[in-house]
């Protein structure tokens, strides 16, 4: 009965979110996006002048894999958060919103499973200027995959490590996640160790190699691969300890702050209380509501 009610709740939320430009799909198997040519958006979306301030921009354009479930779950989460915090919110798949005038209306930008070559070079530069001038950014799951390689600043400075793959057999694995930096404001309310079921990303290196600060990592020995994934995991392996396989990290590009989490393939991730609290605390940290002096920035650690 609870599962049925959860599905119905998400269906109703999707009906509301579609009106704002967010993609929605009920829980189920991940969907594969069709291959399409890169098309850059040139006409900015119409953002009402009555939008409540301060405001959140949630951006979920995909020119690669589209995580329909995760996008719907994150959209719902940030709608709820904006209501709780008294923020306005605008969700869109239109990259033409990345112009100086529109970005000036937002305190924080969320890349909600954004994949592929989604922004034009001019839009990329506008976002970089906004973030380095003191902007606040949260990136979720697919926003850190390997389809952003052509955007050098983003892939090297904001994300850092390059995504190499994820298991398929089984697709989701319940593993232990461990807090790596308990003193950081984002992790202050998180347990030292908790379990999370996820499509876990593997990377070719660690965020610390790019001047980023890891906050949580996973225990690779908890994976139970089958078939071809036994060999894949052996090739992808980053290390047995959580410090060797980070999945959440932060940075401070210029005067701005960034938070990336590899969690969030499924909408169900956003129902997990531990993860919801981490995202709430990340919201406060990137906005400098917590840690205004930047003690949690990589350079200060």
Image (cartoon, helix red, strand yellow):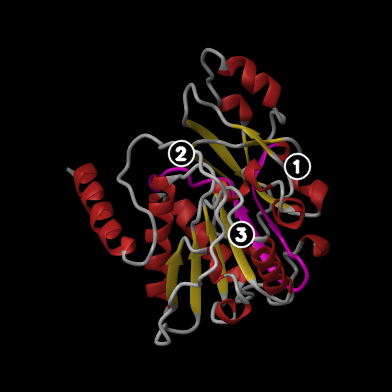
Give the extent of the magenta segment. 245-268
- Give coordinates of residue 149: x percent, y percent: 71, 46
Using residue 46 as the reference point, say whether residue 283 is left or right of it: right
- State which mark lies toward you, 1 or 2: 2
Q: Which residue is mark 2?
A: 34
The residue that label 1 is drawn on is 206
Q: Foreground: 99 or 76?
A: 99
Query: Considering only order in the chain, which callout, 3 or 1, is on the residue closer to the N terminus?
Result: 3
Looking at the figure, which quarter contains the C terminus? bottom right
Q: Residue at the far left: name it.
A: 1
What secondary structure is found at the residue carrying circle 2? loop
Between the residue at mark 2 and the residue at mark 3, the CA separation in whole angstroms equals: 18 Å
Tell me the element at label 1.
Answer: loop
Q: Is residue 257 magenta?
A: yes
Q: Position of residue 234 (x, y in %)?
A: 67, 19
Residue indicated by mark 3: 119
Please tell me how crowded label 1 is: few (under 14), some (14-19), or many (20+) other residues with Cα within 10 Å: many
- Examine the rendered structure and indicate whether residue 116 appears above or below residue 282: above
């Amino acid at each position: 009965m609870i599962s049925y009610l959860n599905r119905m709740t998400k269906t109703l939320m999707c009906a509301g979110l579609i009106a704002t430009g967010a993609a929605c799909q009920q829980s189920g198997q991940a969907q594969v996006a069709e291959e399409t040519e890169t098309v850059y958006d040139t006409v900015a979306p119409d953002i009402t002048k009555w939008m409540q301030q301060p405001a959140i921009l949630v951006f979920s354009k995909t020119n690669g894999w589209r995580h329909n479930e995760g996008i719907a779950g994150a959209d719902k989460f940030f709608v709820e958060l904006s209501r709780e915090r008294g923020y306005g919110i605008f969700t869109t798949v239109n990259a033409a919103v990345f112009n100086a005038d529109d970005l000036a209306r937002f305190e924080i930008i969320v890349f909600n499973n954004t994949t592929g070559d989604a922004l034009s070079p001019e839009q990329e530069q506008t976002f970089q200027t906004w973030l380095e001038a003191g902007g606040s950014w949260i990136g979720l799951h697919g926003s850190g995959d390997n389809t952003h390689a052509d955007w050098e600043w983003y892939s090297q400075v904001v994300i850092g490590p390059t995504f190499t793959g994820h298991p398929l057999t089984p697709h989701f694995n319940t593993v232990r996640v461990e807090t790596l930096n308990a003193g950081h404001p984002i992790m202050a309310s998180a347990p030292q160790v908790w379990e999370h079921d996820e499509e876990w990303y593997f990377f070719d290196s660690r965020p610390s190699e790019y001047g980023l600060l890891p906050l949580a990592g996973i225990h690779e020995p908890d994976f139970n691969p089958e078939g071809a994934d036994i060999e894949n995991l052996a090739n992808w392996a980053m290390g047995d300890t959580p410090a060797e396989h980070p999945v959440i990290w932060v940075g401070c590009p210029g005067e701005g702050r960034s938070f990336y989490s590899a969690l969030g393939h499924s909408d169900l991730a956003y129902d997990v209380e531990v993860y919801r609290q981490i995202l709430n605390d990340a919201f406060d940290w990137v906005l400098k509501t917590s840690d205004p002096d930047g003690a949690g920035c990589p350079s200060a650690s």
